């Protein structure tokens, strides 16, 4: 009887995380917390093994291993990156095991960013499968900055 109760409580806790906005938001909140603390071990544990991270530069499409190499080197210096969540939306697949989100983040140095991505529920926990960090450009500045970006890549 004792074993049945333990299995019940463990499976009930797992089931409560499927489709749980709070559980997904906890992962994303921890992502930003661990990055600001330069805690690489906890930070990269939030990502699925086949995760992809897209940074703000067009060349920054990193699988987990490459992103981890970059991030751990930076975190080893004691320096991470800090973003404060301003706004977030979370959505779920019909089975509750896939979540996608968009969030507005604040960087004291650069201003507002947008983060988007996908999390998947693997066995007992949510993992980030894809994260995309971008610096939105206001429409009335698009033409000016698009020309600068084109010229930048031509020079490379």
Image (cartoon, grey):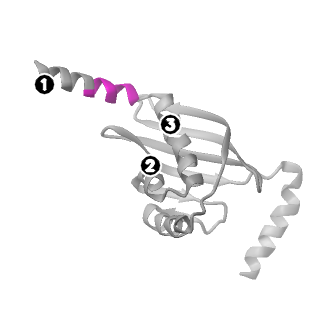
Measured in 3D between alpha carbons, the distance from the residue under mark 2 to the one under mark 3, in whole angstroms, is 10 Å
* Residue at the spot 26% in from the left edge and 27% down from the top edge: 11
Q: Which numbered marker is on residue 130? A: none
Q: Main secondary structure of the magenta part?
A: helix
- State the image coordinates of residue 117 (x, y, percent, origin top left): 55, 46
Badge 1: few (under 14), some or many (20 or more) residues near its Cα, within 10 Å? few
Where does residue 93 sit, x and y in percent of width and height? 46, 32
Magenta span includes 27: no
Residue found at x 30% / y 23%: 12
Q: Residue 122, located in which quarter of the rendered image?
A: top left
Q: Which residue is mark 3?
A: 26
Q: Residue furthest top?
A: 1
Does residue 95 appear in this view? no
- Work out how far the residue at label 2 is from the one at label 1, CA to CA, in angstroms: 30 Å
Query: Looking at the image, is mark 1 or mark 3 earlier in the sequence?
Result: 1
Numbered disc 1: secondary structure: helix
Residue lying at the far bottom in this picture: please name it.
155
* Residue designated by label 1: 3
Mark 3 secondary-structure assignment = helix
Residue 86 position in % (x across, y down): 70, 38
Q: Quadrant of the C terminus?
A: bottom right
Judge by depth and name the residue closer to the eye, 100 or 16. 16
Q: Residue at x 52, y 44 (%)?
A: 30
* Residue 13 on the magenta segment: yes
Toward the front, the furthest residue is 78
Instruction: Tell me whether the residue at label 2 lies in contact with that at label 1, contact meaning CB atoms closer than 8 angstroms.
Output: no
Quarter occupied by residue 147:
bottom right
Residue range in magenta is 10-17
Residue at the disc numbered 2: 46
């Amino acid at each position: 009887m004792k074993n049945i109760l333990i299995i019940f409580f463990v499976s009930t806790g797992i089931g409560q995380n499927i489709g749980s906005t709070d559980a997904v938001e906890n992962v994303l909140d921890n992502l930003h917390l661990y990055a600001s603390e330069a805690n690489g071990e906890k930070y990269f544990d939030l990502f699925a093994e086949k995760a992809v991270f897209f940074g703000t530069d067009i060349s920054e499409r990193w699988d987990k291993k490459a992103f981890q190499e970059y991030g751990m080197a930076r975190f080893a210096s004691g320096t991470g990156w800090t973003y404060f969540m301003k706004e977030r939306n979370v959505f779920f697949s019909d089975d509750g095991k896939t979540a996608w989100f968009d969030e507005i983040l604040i960087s004291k140095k650069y201003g507002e960013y947008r983060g988007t991505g996908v999390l998947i529920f693997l066995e007992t926990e949510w993992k980030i499968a894809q994260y995309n960090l971008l610096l939105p450009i206001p429409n009335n500045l698009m033409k000016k900055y698009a020309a600068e970006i084109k010229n930048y890549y031509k020079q490379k």
